[in-house]
Image: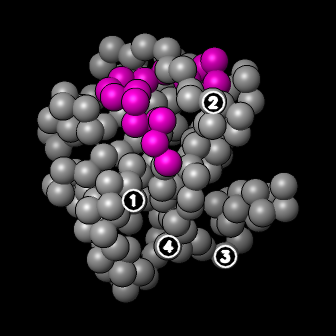
Amino acid sequence: MKSTPVTLPSHCAQRVSSDLATRIVGAGETALLAEPLLGLIASRECPGHVLLETLDRVPEWVKAGRVIVSGFHSPLEQQVLRSVLRRKGRVVKVLARGMRDYRPTTEEREPLAVGRMLVITACPPEVRRTTRETALARNRLVLALASEIVVPHVADDSPLAALLNERRSA
């Protein structure tokens, strides 16, 4: 997928370092970044009832016109992405790798084409696989871009828990 440099709106740019902001590239509708973003992050493993409770909230988010920003990597996040896209909602997907080898899924092609989706990354093109380090960097970017955060589940003593504690104490 062809990517281009992304200029962050001022309200987003002030929450990320200038170095990071200059590395962000993307494909899709960059105007989505100008809206208040609802950040979604969750640990890889979570109880089934948490998944169902989170999916029950998706229709209200879509109806309210919320733009959801996430890595859409954990199973819960992936289910939310599918639900939002089926309902014609809008999303910003943040990758934990470069864009060079990114191929949109069948579900993502139409939203990308009609302006309901943006895919971004701050990783260099040669980063081909998600690592613990790039996943944490991705989650930091999601937290920085979001004006509001939803965290349905965080595993105790996980890197995500540490990241959220770091953010709270900042």
Which residue in the structure is indicated by mark 4?
152
Q: Quadrant of the N terminus?
A: top left
Q: Quadrant of the C terminus?
A: bottom right
Cα gap from disc 1 to disc 2, whole angstroms: 27 Å
Which residue in the structure is indicated by mark 2?
10
Cα gap from disc 4 to disc 2, whole angstroms: 28 Å
Please state which of the two labelled residues, at mark 2 or mark 3, is closer to the viewer.
2
Extent of the magenta region: 21-36
Question: What residue do we see at 71% from left, 71% from top?
Answer: 157
Q: Which residue sits furthest right?
A: 169
* Label disc, if present, on residue 77 of the rendered structure: 1
Between disc 1 and disc 4, whose residue precedes?
1
Q: Which residue sits furthest bottom?
A: 49
Which residue in the structure is indicated by mark 3?
156
Nearer to the camera, 29 or 103: 29
Between disc 4 and disc 2, whose residue precedes?
2
List x then y, in percent, for residue 66.
38, 55
Cα gap from disc 4 to disc 3, whole angstroms: 13 Å
- Type of residue at label 3? Asp
Residue 163 visible within the image? yes
Nearer to the camera, 95 or 147: 147
List x then y, in percent, for residue 121.
50, 30
- Type of residue at label 2? Ser
Between disc 1 and disc 2, whose residue precedes?
2
User: In the rendered structure, does residue 22 fall within the stretch colored magenta?
Assistant: yes
Please state which of the two labelled residues, at mark 3 or mark 1, is closer to the viewer.
1
- The answer to whether 56 is drawn above or below residue 21 in the figure is below
List x then y, in percent, for residue 35.
46, 42
